[in-house]
């Protein structure tokens, strides 16, 4: 081994250059402790490496929480599952752990009247998933459509949709609030088709499929979009009154049906 010069005064500079801020901050205390307790060098070094890694993971999650744009203050702990008996807490907690559905690109559809807690559940799930290491983006569907329409105008739609692939889960809140003029382009369909069986969507709506005819340019595209969305989907109808409708909407719509009929 060649001679190594040791100059503790240069250490902050070296660690900065190596981009090891946690080690830079923590080494003096840890070194003092290691000296005092006569740690083997290996133990000291691996303790520092672990601290840097843990700090990186923490910063990554912090970054992902910021980029997720989740509405503040909505957590799973803060959700009263007793208020929505149709919603199985165990099922929601299983979804919050991520693994199987996100890796398959499966979807989650939340239906229920205004105030039934759809946005709360969507936000809380998103937050927990980010904390579990996944990447999430929460948007109102109208905002997403507007954004994709702008990309289409500058011929960047495919690239913009591809960039959204970095998110394991895209939350499209209130799909049925897409306005008629927004529906004239097919950007939302293109997004749904591009993510199909690859990347997950969480969609909320006041009504299951019934009024989705105004969300897409034509009935055939509406049916095609719904078909893709429900193919691998968990559907929660957050409506305590209508058990019959709840079972009806989990049926896969037939391709030749008008969308309005699929909810009848
Ligand atoms: P939706 O998106 O279905 O219209 P929200 O999720 O916005 O409804 O819920 C409306 C308000 O009520 C929010 O402040 C939300 O946090 C709260 N809320 C709804 N359902 C519950 C629940 N079961 N437990 C706790 N808070 C709830
Ligand atoms: Mg809402």
Image: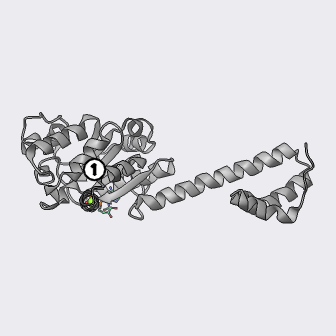
Task: Quarter of the image for the N terminus: give it.
Answer: top right
Where is residue 71? Give x, y as percent. Answer: 38, 63
Q: In which quadrant of this rendering is ligand 2 seen?
A: bottom left
Where is residue 114? Give x, y as percent. Answer: 21, 59
Where is residue 258? Give x, y as percent. Answer: 6, 41
Where is residue 259? Give x, y as percent. Answer: 10, 43
Q: Quadrant of residue 150?
A: bottom left
Task: Quarter of the image for the C terminus: give it.
Answer: top left
Visible residue check, residue 236:
no
| Between 70 and 83, the one nearer to me in the picture | 70
Q: Residue at x 53, y 55 (%)?
A: 61
> Is residue 13 rendered to the left or right of residue 167?
right
Q: Residue at x 40, y 60 (%)?
A: 70
Q: Residues within 10 Å of mark 1 (few under 14, many from 20)?
A: many
Find the residue positioned furthest to the front.
155
Say above or below: 21 vs 45: below
Q: Secondary structure at mark 1?
A: strand
Q: Residue at x 38, y 37 (%)?
A: 101
Q: Which residue is mark 1?
A: 203
Q: Quadrant of residue 86?
A: top left
């Amino acid at each position: 081994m060649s001679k190594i010069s040791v100059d503790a005064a240069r250490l902050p500079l070296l660690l900065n250059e190596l981009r090891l801020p946690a080690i830079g901050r923590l080494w003096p205390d840890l070194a003092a402790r290691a000296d005092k307790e006569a740690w083997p060098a290996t133990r000291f070094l691996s303790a520092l490496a672990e601290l840097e890694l843990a700090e990186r993971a923490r910063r990554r999650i912090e970054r992902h929480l910021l980029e997720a744009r989740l509405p503040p203050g909505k957590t799973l702990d803060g959700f009263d599952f007793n208020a929505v008996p149709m919603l199985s807490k165990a099922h929601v907690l299983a979804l919050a752990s991520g693994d199987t559905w996100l890796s398959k690109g499966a979807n989650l559809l939340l239906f229920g009247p205004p105030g039934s807690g759809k946005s709360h559940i969507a936000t809380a799930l998103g937050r927990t998933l980010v904390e579990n290491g996944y990447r999430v983006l929460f948007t109102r569907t109208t905002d997403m459509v507007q954004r994709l329409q702008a990309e289409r105008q500058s011929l960047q739609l495919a690239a913009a949709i591809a960039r959204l692939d970095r998110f394991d889960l895209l939350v499209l809140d209130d799909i049925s609030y897409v306005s008629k003029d927004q529906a004239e382009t097919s950007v939302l369909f293109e997004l749904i088709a591009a993510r199909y069986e690859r990347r997950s969507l969480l969609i909320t709506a006041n009504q299951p499929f019934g009024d989705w005819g105004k969300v897409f340019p034509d009935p055939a595209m509406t049916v095609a979009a719904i078909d893709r969305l429900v193919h691998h989907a968990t559907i929660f109808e957050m409506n305590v009154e209508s058990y019959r409708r709840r079972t009806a909407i989990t049926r896969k719509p037939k391709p030749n049906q008008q969308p309005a009929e699929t909810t009848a």
